[in-house]
Structure formats: C-alpha cells, structure tokens
Image: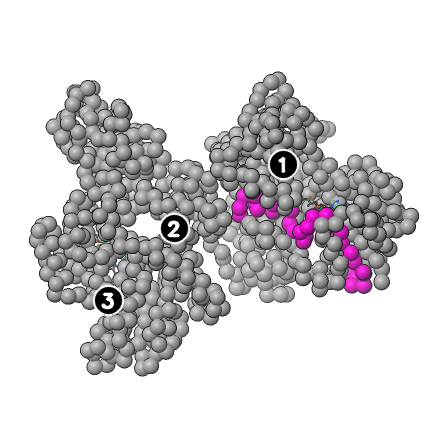
Amino acid sequence: MKWIRITETENIPPREGRVIAAGKELPADPIAIFNLGDRFVAIENRCPHGGGPLADGIVGGATVTCPLHNWRICLDSGRVSQPCDGAASTVRTFPVRVDEGVLLVGISETPR
Amino acid sequence: MNKLVLIGNGMAGVACIEQILKFRQDFDITIFGDETHVNYNRILLSSVLAGEKSSSDIVLNSIEWYQTNGIRARLGVAIREIDQARKVVIDQDGNETEFDQLIIATGSSPFVPQVEGVNKENIHVFRTLDDTRALLEKSAPGAKAVVIGGGLLGLEAARGLQVQGCDVSVVHLMDTLMERQLDPAGGACLQRKMEELGVRVLLGRKTEAFLGNGHVQGLRFAGGEEIGADLVVVAAGIRPNAQLAREAGLKVNRGIVVNDFMQTSHPDIYAVGECAEHNGMVYGLVAPLYEQGKALAAAVAGRTAPGFSGANLSTKLKIMGVDVFSAGSIEEQGEGLETVRYEDPSQGVYKRVFLRNNRLVGAILVGDTTDDRKYLEWLRSGEDLSAHRRHLLFPPPMADAGSDVAAMADSETVCGCMGVTKGEIVHAIHEHGVSTLAQLKDRTRASTGCGSCAGTCSSILRAVSPDFEDESRKTICGCLPFTQEQLRTMIRTQKLRSPQDVLDIYGNGEGCAVCKPALSYLVDVTWCGDHHEDRSARFINDRVHANIQKDGTFSVVPRMRGGVTTPAELRRIADVAEKYKVPLVKVTGSQRLDLLGVRKEDLPAVWEELGMPSGQAYTKGVRMVKTCVGNQFCRFGTQDAISAGVELETRLENLYTPHKFKLAVVGCPRNCAEATVKDVGLIGQEGSWQIVVGGAAGKGVRKADLLTTVETTEEALEASEVFFQYYRENANYLERSYDFVERLGIEKIRKETIYAAPEVRQALLDRLRKSKDKSYDAWLERLAPRPSQFVTIQPMEHQTV
Ligand code: SRM
Ligand SMILES: Cc1cc2nc3c(=O)[nH]c(=O)nc-3n(C[C@H](O)[C@H](O)[C@H](O)COP(=O)(O)OP(=O)(O)OC[C@H]3O[C@@H](n4cnc5c(N)ncnc54)[C@H](O)[C@@H]3O)c2cc1C
Ligand code: SF4
Ligand code: FES
C-alpha cells in the first residue's frame, strides 16, 4: 500500500466532498474525498448510474446522494443503497489517514 | 345570592365552575389561587418546556372570562385555614371570606425525597408555569441535566430539557421506565426510544445525596456511584394537597375523602381533582377529574345526575416520535388472566393486551398507538371479544379508508382529556357547521387537552364534514418526524439558525439530500437571512451558483432585468463565450442568455468578465421578470411594462423561495409576456394594474387567480411584494405558487395579504426588506471563495510514505 499525500484537511469543509485531480501515483479516474465531520473517506468520483460527480453530492451521515439523479451511495462500502438495484456496480473506495493535518490516501500497489 | 368559594385555580376546579355556570348563573363566585396566573392547561407545560408552545398558548380561561362571568379572581392569594363551623375561609393575610358552599381543588404537590443536600440551588420540581419558566431559564446548551423519576412527567421533562440543548440523564429507582403503566418489555422498548433521542437512562438507582456546595454539582446513588449535574429536576411522584382539609377537621386519608357527589364529611364542602379521594382512589389525570367536576357541578346546582363512579385510567406520553399508551389494569397475574403480545424490536413496536373471560382489562402500546381508542372503547364497554380474537393487536384489513371512522360507535370517547365522544363531534359538525379542527376545539373543547386525539378528530371531520379542509400533515422525509409547519415553529421558538442544529435536536443528526436543502430554506426565511449558512446542506447548484449539467459542467445565466440588455453586455457575453470555449450560447425561455458547458474552475473568471449579476437560474429563488415592450414602443401599450418589470426584479432579486419563482409584467391584456401563467403577473390596463398569482405553464397549465386590481404602479409592486413574502413564509418547501394558491384558496390568501390589517401587511413588507438587506449577488463570492469552492484539488508532491 502506498500512501499519497493529498492536501491539508482544512481544504475539505465538514460534510462536503472535493475532487482530487488524477496524478501519476493516483488512479486515472479522479478520487473524491469527503469530510464526514469526525473522519474522512475517499471513493472514486463516478456514480455507477451515469458517471455523475459524487463529490458534488449532499452528504448525510456516511451516505452521499449523486447530484444528477439522486442515487445514494454508502461511502464506507461504495455500495449503492438506493435505488435497490442488485445489478448496480460498487464504487471503488480508498483508505484515508490524517498525518499532522495532511490527508493521505492509500493506493494498493497491485492495481485491481 | 349563594356564596360559592373555590380554593385552587387549577384544571379540575375551574372546569367544575364552568360546568356549574352551564346549569345556573346565580352564584356569587370567588376563586382563590396561589399561583399568579389565570387558569392554564397544566398538561401542556411539557410542550412549553419543549418550546412547542408559549405560555400564552396554554391559557384556558382568560381574565375576560372571569370578568364576564362575574367571578372574583383572587390570584396569588393562598388560603391558610378553613373554619367549617363558621363557614369562612381565611387567606394568607388573615382576611376572611364567607361561603355557603366551598369547593376544595388544591391539586397536589411534587414529592421530593428528603435526602442529603436537597436544598442546594438548581434543584427544581416541574408542576407549575413558574417552575417551567425557571427550568427554561436554567437550561442551556451543553448543561448537564439530571431528571429523577422515569415516569410520564420525568420523561417529558427530560425531552424538554434535551430540546433546550441540555445533556440529559433520567435516573429511575425501578428497573422499568413508567413501571406503573408498562410491563418490563414495554419499558425496555420505551427506553430504547428515549436513548435513540439521545437521553441517557439510568435504572435501579436510588439517589442518596446531592453533591456540590451551594449549587448542585452532582448526585450520589446508593452503592456509591456518582454522576455530575448542573441542573436537577425531581419528578418522583406527587402528594395530594390535603393538609388544609385535614386541619379543618374534614375526613382525610391520602386525599380528602368524598362520596359519589364529591361531598366531603361536611355537606357544604366539596373536593375535586387530585386532592380528592374517591372509593380509596386518588386520580392524577385530567379525564377522571373532569368527570368528578361534572358530578360535583350537578350536585351544587341542585340537579339530579348520576354521581361519579370511578374511571378507567389511560395514559399517553406526549413526546413527539415516542408513542406510548397504557390503559386499564396491567397486572401480570390473576385468576383467568390471558395476555396476547406482539413485538418487533427493529420497528420499535410493542403491543400487549390483557384479557379476562374474553374481555379487555388492560392494554399497552409502544411505538404504534394508532388504535388506542379501540382499546379504550373495549375497556369501557366490557364487550365480549371472542369475535375479535384474530384481530386483537391489528385491525382487520380495511375495506375503505373511511371505514375506520364509520366503525366507531357514537358513544366512543375520542378526546379522553375533555371527555368528548364521537357522537358529540358529529353533532357539532352537523348542527354548527364545524369544518376545521380550530372550530371543533372552540365548540367541543375536543383536542384542547393533551392534543393527542387531533388526528382522530381530523379523520372524523374529513369523513363527516362536507367542507373539511385538510391541514397538510406531511413530513419532509424519514430523518425528521415533523411537518414543515412544526419545523418552522421549532426553528423560531428554539432559535435554531442552522440545518445541522435542527437535525441534531429534532432529527437523526445526519439528514439527507431531501431534508437538508429544505431546512436550509426554512432557517433562511425564518431569520430573514440572518441564519448560519451551511453550504454542506445545499445542493451543488447552490454551492457554486450555477446549474450542474449531465457531464458535470455548469450553465451560466446572467441576470438581464426585464429581459432588457445593452450592446456592451452582449459584446462581453460574446467575448466570454469565445475565451472560455463555451460549447453553447442559447436564448432561454425566460428572455435571457444561457452559456452552457462551463467548467467549475472557470466560473469565477466567467462571472468576473461578464460583469453581470447572477440570474439565479440554478436555484429555488427569484428567476426573472419577463416583460413586454409596453407603452414605451407598442401602439397598444397602456402601461410602462418594462420600467415596472425592471423595478420589480430589482426589488426581489437575490431572494430565495420555497420553489423557483417567475414573474412577468405586460402592458396590456394581450399579454405578450404570458403574465397569466406566472407565479406573479402584472397586467396593465387603462389606468390600473391587475395582479394575478399562482399561474403555471410547465408540467401543467393553470391560469393565475386575480389577487387584486390597483391604480398605481407603486401599489402594484407592493401587492406583489406582500404576496411574495406571504408565499415565502407559508408555502411548503418545493411547493410552487400554483399548488400553494390552489391549496389555500385565493379568498384566504386575499384575506391574509391585501385585505389584512395594515400592521400585518407592513410586517410582511418589513420582513421582506430585512431579508433583502441581508441578500447579495451570489456571484460576488468569487471575491472571497470558501475553501476550494471552485477548484479541483491538486495532490501535494507525490511522496511515498
Ligand atoms: C434553460 C431553460 C430552457 C431554455 O433553454 O430555454 C430551462 C432549463 C431547465 N429547466 Fe426549465 N428552463 C427554462 C425555462 C423554463 C420555463 C419557461 C419560463 O421560465 O418562462 C418553464 C415553464 C414555466 C415554469 O417554470 O413553470 C420551465 C419549466 C421547468 C420545469 C417544470 C416546472 C413546473 O413546476 O411545472 C422544470 C422542472 C422543475 O423545476 O422541477 C424545469 C427545469 C429545468 C432544468 C433546471 C432541469 C434541471 O434541473 O437541470 C433545466 C436546466 C438546464 C440547464 O442546465 O441550464 N423547467 N422552464 C430555461 C431557463 C430560463 C431562464 O432563463 O432562467
Ligand atoms: C408537566 C405535566 C404534564 C401532565 N401531563 C398530563 C397528561 O398528559 N394527561 C393528564 O391527564 N394529566 C397530566 N398531568 C396532570 C394534570 O395536570 C393534573 O392531573 C391536573 O392539573 C390536576 O388538576 P387539579 O385542579 O386537581 O390540580 P392543579 O391543576 O394542580 O390545580 C390546583 C391549584 O390549586 C392551587 N392551590 C393549592 N393550594 C392552595 C391554597 N391553599 N390556596 C390557593 N390555591 C391553592 C395550586 O397552586 C394550583 O394552582 C400533567 C401534569 C404536569 C405537571
Ligand atoms: S424541457 Fe426538459 S430537457 Fe428541456 S431544458 Fe427543460 S428540463 Fe431540460
Ligand atoms: S449519474 Fe448519479 S444518479 Fe444518475
């Protein structure tokens, strides 16, 4: 697991998400990082419905609602919680940690 | 005239006087009350503590009532002595008042266990309005409050203090909450609900001492455990106020002993309410006390009427979202006793009924109390339930929605507090044309006690009254179990200024994409823009002030007031479109230009270079005022539509509304800018303007209703503003004006806007002005953006750790 330094925690206000530009150590699809108030979570910034930008969604608890057509995605598991659609694919999640006010995202070295 | 004296200006005594006045007007009545307030609804003190009602909302009899009925009210005066031989009462100042008949209705006092340290400051009881005010004053966000007593009163006090922001624990001596009304399983279910609300519950704790010097700082329980406290409420039971009667030599056990006509051992002295003991029973709920009052009133007035013969007890907890009902006897064991129960912990529902010989003797409902009346009726009638055995806990599947009301017997009690039956309500509807809950309250007093029967009353009104109008009872979503109307009240009374505060105190603390934008609107409009803006609770459009497109880019619609532009503006728009490679420039359906496909990062620069304000095309706010050319150029024009439209847009722009708000101004009835299908339309005529509201030409088409016709342009603008603010304050979030006008009816809207008293109209305008002063062009946020508001975050140096 590689830990990539991303940004200072204050750049992501409580209960909001922000998009991280793709970089050479990060996956080609941008990552969204959310501040849940008491912790941070990171997932791929692509809604499984139509590719909507999840970072722009409204956060309630550990769920984000996609701004385009209101699909709800669990930020811990990456699973779609609404609508109930068994075929919906799961959004990739990434571990996050905070080190002296800086957010780090963990990328597994063997790409999936 | 017969001199009638009442000691105790409380619920039972005054209700009894009201009843006496119905029979006879020829008494010379004096009422002594040691509280300084007029008669109020003690039951609703819990709602006052929870901020749902104000002290003036709970007044039962105003001072005018005493005056019109010729009653001498001696408020703030306690009676110290009764001389039964001389038939006088003596007050605290030694003054004597003679009586021919005396009614003692002194109620009861909170029982406070005399443990060590009980006299410290900030240890309170919860019985009177003054107690409630003191608690409201002492409670503060973050204060540690401890309530001693896990009965009805204690739990309601706990919830009230919690709503005030306190960190609350309930301490109970027993192992079950409300153990007099619930069995252990029901108590456990209730406990989970209280804990879900955020109230800590400590069972099996006997308070041994209050700690701290001067002020209370904590409690010690038997066994040595200690907890901290800044404020303590003792709700450990009540004791009848019978001392006065005892000293007067009347017969007293626990309460003042009375017969079926509430007569004490002295034939001219009566007792009623919580201070009286009938057949070994002292009652602590208003329903039986009102029954006692009726028997007493008949006796004093010399009527022959049935006496009081005891009552079935039923209790309902008055905490929103925590439904608890208990009635009759809930003894676990006994000859021939059967019980039937249902439990679903995931839903928080628990039900149990107690039967003897197929007849109901008791019932417990937690989490779902919709059928409480059915059980009360079964208890009252004592009917054989063999035929209902399959449906004891759930109603049989319903044939049609109205059958629930139809199935009720006329004798069935709907309002337990005031003892109003279904038959009396139906009578009021037919005989007195009652069609709203408010009228029903006035006429029958139904639903004026604890208020928990309001739903049933509405169902009866809906089923029986030809012109019943439903008060919308819809909640926004599952995160908050309240209607928008209730939320507005809570926001105002609790001084909540951010959506998160509302969610923390009244909801699940989290919220979702449905309720958060709604709450954002409600706090904004309630505080006229003086709220705490929480952008995380806003839809993305309102975080970046542009409309999100299907590919994640945004559209930009600058404001062009009245659809009027200039060559310079058009040139700048063209330059921006080229410089930022805007994929599409389009004339919109609202008389302005749309730049579609702008990247989020480019928004601040695009706005800057346009040099025009936001057209709010992305939000629930004031979109635009369409205009026609009007008399400036048009040969038919009778009014200057452009000037009026530009002025109207200037007055309302940058304000937010329950749903988007579109206006139009036209110079004559040819209506070239479609004013008759807008939220507000101004239609010019020779020498006057028509103001029309609630029009639509979107998903549906609705011709706007005429609000009023006025002579001058200024009057036309003001009428529009009054309606606009009225809509902002009264519509549900996401309710367009066409639904709002349809729901309320134009007559009611006229009455409350243009025909309202000048002060009312002025107040609407003042609040509008206040909001307007706080409002600003959202695109100016480019000058001081929030943290990474418009940017994609670039990762720091790619370091491996
Ligand atoms: C751009 C525009 C179409 C155009 O190219 O002309 C437009 C575009 C959209 N309309 Fe509209 N409406 C536009 C004029 C209208 C009009 C005509 C008017 O304003 O006179 C109507 C009928 C009048 C009305 O409002 O009822 C109209 C009735 C709707 C409705 C149905 C509203 C209803 O309650 O009946 C929606 C859906 C909604 O709001 O729930 C809607 C929603 C939308 C949304 C916001 C859909 C969305 O949520 O993304 C579209 C945004 C496109 C974008 O990304 O910018 N739009 N839309 C017009 C922008 C006007 C402006 O300058 O602000
Ligand atoms: C917070 C709260 C919530 C409640 N909720 C419910 C509920 O949901 N349902 C329900 O049925 N019941 C409820 N009750 C109980 C209900 O309020 C009482 O049963 C009812 O008020 C009793 O009426 P009363 O007239 O006997 O006594 P009170 O209403 O207490 O009236 C007695 C009055 O006499 C005055 N007084 C006493 N001694 C003297 C004296 N010597 N001289 C002059 N005046 C004197 C007292 O100050 C008081 O004002 C609740 C009570 C409280 C405090
Ligand atoms: S009519 Fe439908 S497709 Fe066209 S802009 Fe309006 S919402 Fe979008
Ligand atoms: S793209 Fe996310 S819900 Fe449609």
The mark that comes first in sequence, 1 or 3, is 1
| Residue B126 part of the magenta-drawn span | no
**Residue under label 2:** B530
Q: Quadrant of residue A103?
A: top left
**Residue under label 3:** B562
Give the residue at x 55% y 54%: B458
Q: Is B309 on the left-hand or right-hand side of B446?
A: right
Q: Is residue B741 above or below residue B357?
A: below
In magenta, the rendered stretch is: B23-52
Quick one: SS at disc 3? helix
Please provide percent x and percent y for residue B775: 32, 55
Q: Is residue B801 above or below residue B250?
A: above
Quick one: SS at disc 1? strand
Q: Is B484 on the left-hand or right-hand side of B619?
A: right
* Amino acid under disc 3: Gly
Give the quadrant of ligand 1: bottom left
Please provide percent x and percent y for residue B228: 54, 26
The mark that comes first in sequence, 3 or 2, is 2
**Residue under label 1:** B124
